[in-house]
Image (spheres, rainbow, N blue to C red):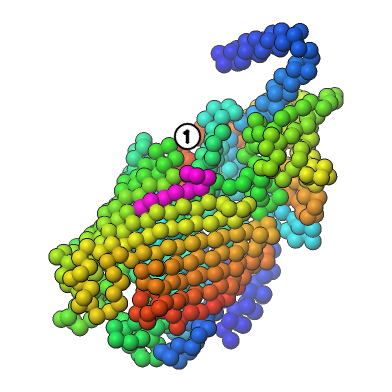
Amino acid sequence: MALRLKGTMMKTIKILGVLLLASMVGFTSAMAMDVDEIVNRANLASYYGGDDGKARAKMVIKNDKGDERTREFTILRLDKEDGGDQFFYLYFHKPGDVAKTVFMVHKKVGGDDDRWLYLPALDLVKRIAASDKRTSFVGSNFFYEDVSGRQVDDDTHTLLEETGDAYILMNVPKDPDSVEFSRYKLWIDKKTFLPVKAEYEDKQGKLYRVVEALKFGEFDGVPTVTESRVKDLVSGGETVLTFSDISYGVGLDESLFTERYLRKPPRKYIRR
Amino acid sequence: MKRIALAALIVTLSPLSFAAELPFTGFLEAGIASRIVGDDNADDEIVMQEGRFQLDFLNDGDYGTLQFKGDFVSDGVTEESRLELRELSIIMTPHEQIDLKVGRQTLTWGTGDLLFLNDLFPKDWQSFFIGRDDEYLKKPSDALRASWFGDTWNVDLAWTPTFTPDGFVDGERLSYWGGSGKAGPKSGYTIDPVEVDKTIDNGELAGRVYANLGGNEVAFYGYRGFYGQPLGYDAGENNLYHPELVSYGASVRSALFGGVVNIEVARYQSEDDSSGDNPMVPNSEVRGLVAFSREILPEQTLGVQFYIEHMDDWDSSAEDAGGFDRGEDRVWWTLRYRGMFMQQNLILSLFTFYSPTDDDGYARPKVTYKISDKLQYTIGGNIFFGEEDNSFFGQLEDNTNIYARLRYSY
């Protein structure tokens, strides 16, 4: 309650500041301030729902020939603070060759994440080198960054348009060489602040990748995207990601994200 | 023929994938490996030809977790069928800070990539050299693993009541340096070392104390048992044996320079040669490892390791040893490349060992392609080279082989 009050106060101060600034430098900066607010709220809505969360994820990956591959995993997430560092724990159920494998991430905002892979057949806890965040996540059309979130500060954001139910933003990377796109257009739902759609343009300005939220739901009071799809317009491939068994405020403890639970997946949260 | 039969079985079993979910997982695999250079010491160029059926079962309950994993193997080289029990264990949590795992299990710790300093748990090097899956490099132990978890520091103790030796090159499939010349399948001279008595004080005890200090993983290790390979010679028995070994060491692993850095050291005390003057028993050593790996291109990783074994009393033992003089220091450089392509369905990897001190090396190229979620094939090679016939990898030169495996996971 105290936090929320503090948030409201902060917002009031912010708005006052904006008004002051706006009166001095005109309305463009007022616009920019709004955009940051939208982006921050969208970031929290997409990646920091509740203080922790648990879900079962299913990915169906299709190539242009229609060949299908499936990935199924349980994902556990704990936030150190909203918008800050996080812990992720992914337990793979399928396919058979990766079943029981665990992928654990200590995500650090503004630094390289610590990542581990547990390979049960060898009882091996493998430390994984930091990787390009815009590469395929477990062979799907989703990128690591789509799953764990792109750093808000990595792009400059502009509000293009405000429709009845969405904010439409244009996002341009600050370091264009670090990514494969030149910019992306983002639709954000005004009510939930969940991203509804993202369209990525390549370096030539051609649309080549579309991420869309297909289904929504509300769990423990947290609006959630339950089904989303990535279409790769170049390769013709696509991946549909569906979440089930979603819950928030599960009461996950930090100790869960340690070597102990790589060897002994927590039965309480992972149904095998 | 067996291989064809297995392939046929895979095809007939395929419709099973549409059936209801099975309560267990596993795979069917057919594999073959052949020497590519002639070996005068072998009658047959085939070093591996087998069909494997693995069944993996897990049950979670209030008591803990029960795990079973077994391989039924039809082996064309030894012309036998056998059951390999890979795992039969129960994990229990008698106290919120304690886990106990009892039974047959695979045990691993340490930071090296295919270099083991403080991980003295059993390995099957023969499997590793003839093209079986990496999984089989680790040989299971019948052990009790007790772990205590503190706020920062944790303790692991693994007790194996009866010593489990490594799977080593014994001349049955692969030839090796036999002291005065190459020995191999043809000579009929296989290594059958003196077994360690199965008494209670001949068990193996391994321990580890470790912590993750802000992303820096620090660990201390200890071991009391025997050399996994029969490295000692018992004159009385006129046979090789597993000398006693006591070891302790430490490691640290961190994310650094955009990749992962790990450093590990180990002290090996050869208890049967504490004065370091018996050439028939391994000398005491210090072993060290410095390693770095990082992504060089998207989905492509490179790892480099520098490894050294330093003998305590090289002068006194090497002169009389008669075998290969490896010198006071043995150095290995290893390089690993791993790249994923075609949406991670094609995996190319190469692991190489090179020793500038022994003038020999070993390369493991491998290509894996996942045709579907269920079907994948792997082709690869085990390439040994060396200046001398009796160096560590040089002695295996004639065993250089290529292999192929087809696996159907269910």
Look at the image and tell me whether residue B320 can be seen: yes
Relative to residue B384, is residue B264 drawn left or right? left
Amino acid type assigned to the residue bearing label 1 in the image: Asp
Relative to residue A85, is residue A165 drawn left or right? right
Relative to residue B34, is residue B386 drawn left or right? left
Q: Is residue B224 above or below residue A185?
A: below
Residue toward you, B326 or B190: B326
Q: Quadrant of residue A65?
A: bottom right
Residue toward you, B27 or B229: B229
Q: Is residue A189 above or below residue B33?
A: above
**Residue B79 at what x, y percent from top left?**
46, 86
**Which portion, as a residue range, is magenta?**
B255-264
Q: Residues within 10 Å of mark 1 (few under 14, many from 20)?
A: few
Q: Is residue B256 magenta?
A: yes
Count of picture labels: 1
Q: Is residue A126 above or below residue B369?
A: above
Look at the image and tell me whether residue B20 can be seen: no
Q: Quadrant of residue B18?
A: bottom right
Q: Quadrant of residue B6?
A: bottom right
**Residue A206 at what x, y percent from top left?**
83, 45
Q: Is residue B342 above or below residue B230?
A: above
* Residue under numbered circle 1: A253
Q: Is residue A96 magenta?
A: no
**Residue B376 at what x, y percent from top left?**
63, 68
Q: At x 45% / y 63%, what residue is drawn?
A: B334
Residue toward you, B74 or B13: B74
